[in-house]
Amino acid sequence: MEFYNSMPRRVLLSENTLDKEAEEKIADNKRLLDTVSQKIASFNQSVFAINACLVSMQLYDYLLPPMEETTIEIVDTVPCENNGIAQTI
């Protein structure tokens, strides 16, 4: 009987742990995205400088394309309902 009484608490602890892990993963992904964005900006600055040199030498056929930063949307929270599953386990 003791096992059944402790089940809802275990499920609640598990949900809290999953929520915390998800929040940490989102924060890590934001940091990684910021790092990638900075590297793309640095790369593009180098490309523009190289292209300026190529233009001054009239080597238009060798111009380098800048890297385009894609639009990435990070979702802070994802609505999730357990539809009563956690209570019935």
Image (tube, grey):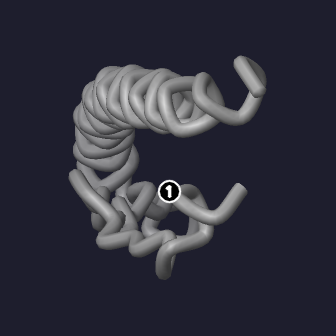
Question: Around disc 1, counting alpha carbons within 10 Å, would you say few (fewer than 14), some (14 to 19), or many (20 or more)?
Answer: some
**Residue 24 to residue 79: above or below:** above
Q: Considering the image in quadrants, where does the C terminus appear?
A: bottom right
* Residue positioned 30% across, 33% down in the render: 30
Residue at horizontal 48 percent and vertical 81 percent from the top:
83
On screen, residue 42 versus residue 19, left or right, reads left
Farthest bottom residue in view: 83
Coordinates of residue 60 in the picture (x, y in percent) = 44, 69
The residue depicted at 50 percent of the width and 56 percent of the height is 64
Q: Residue at x 45, y 34 (%)?
A: 12
> Can the viewer see residue 36?
no
Mark 1, residue position: 64
Residue 51 visible in image: yes
Q: Is residue 62 left or right of residue 76?
A: right
Which quadrant is home to the N terminus? top right
Mark 1 falls on what kind of element?
A: loop
So how many labels did they put on this image? 1
- The spot of residue 80 in percent (x, y) is 40, 70
Q: Position of residue 15 (x, y in %)?
A: 48, 37
Which residue is at the front of the view, 14 or 41? 14
Q: Quadrant of residue 32?
A: top left
Residue closest to the eye, 3 or 66: 3
**Closest to the observer, 6 or 70:** 6
Amino acid on which disc 1 is placed: Leu
Depth check, front residue: 15 or 61: 15
Q: Is residue 45 above or below residue 17?
A: below
Rendered location of residue 37, percent (x, y): 30, 37
**To which quarter of the image does residue 11 belong?**
top right
